[in-house]
Amino acid sequence: MKKFLLGVGMLLTIGMFNGYVCADEAVVGPGKKVTLDYTLTVDNKEVETSVGKEPLTYTPGSHEIIPGLEQQLNGLHVGDKKTVHVAAKDAYGEVDPKAYKEFPVSSLPKGLTPKVGMVLQATAPDGSKFPAVISEVKGDKMVLNFNHPLAGKDLTFDIKILKIE
């Protein structure tokens, strides 16, 4: 009987140890600090990558990355690789026609000639800076696009989870 109880005790100990290891395994989720490598492609063209550079670190639930990407990373483990497709509405939103504004060309710094596609740095009333793209030049007027450059674009990320703390 002692041998039987000793054997059961060892099985319970091993079972508890295995349960402990599984319960403590790091998984992407709220409150964790996640470090990953990514490559972003848009329309089958690489736009940005962290591979060979500084990896991205974020905390799930803190709104540090776009929602459509964050949702699809939950539950991943260190070493996991995943290709994530994010629709425009879950990334930087659709293109907002109200984000196109007309300005006089004379509002540009002296000597700067506006060209379609030129990116300008605009300043908000609170002092924050953001990009604006010249989308049209009409004589002494120009139309600036204040949408995010990736607005209206579906995004594809190739992800590798490097560390979870």
Image (tube, rainbow, N blue to C red):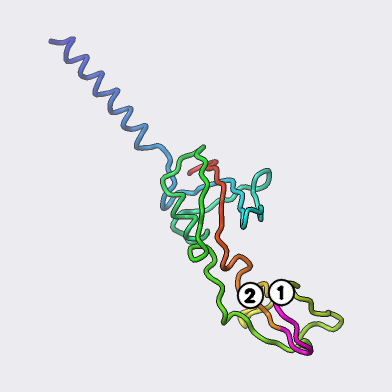
Marked residue nearer the N-terminal end (1 or 2)? 1
Dividing the picture into quarters, in which one does residue 24 lie?
Answer: top left
Q: What's the residue at 68%, 43% (across, down)? A: 52
Against 47, residue 150 (above or below) is below
Against 6, residue 160 (above or below) is below
Residue 40 left/right relative to 104: left
Question: Rounded to the nearest whole Å, what is the CA distance between mark 1 and mark 2?
Answer: 10 Å
Q: What's the residue at 33%, 28% (across, down)? A: 18
Q: Secondary structure at mark 1?
A: strand
Q: What's the residue at 49%, 49% (across, down)? A: 33
Q: Position of residue 133 (x, y in %)?
A: 70, 74
Q: Which residues are magenta?
A: 135-142
Name the residue that disc number 1 marks. 121
Against 104, residue 70 (above or below) is above
Does 145 lie within the magenta span?
Answer: no
Residue 6 left/right relative to 54: left
**Observer-nearest of 91 and 43:** 43
Q: Tell me which secondary structure the magenta stretch mostly adopts.
A: strand
Give, as a three-letter code, the residue at label 2: Ser
Residue 112 left/right relative to 70: right
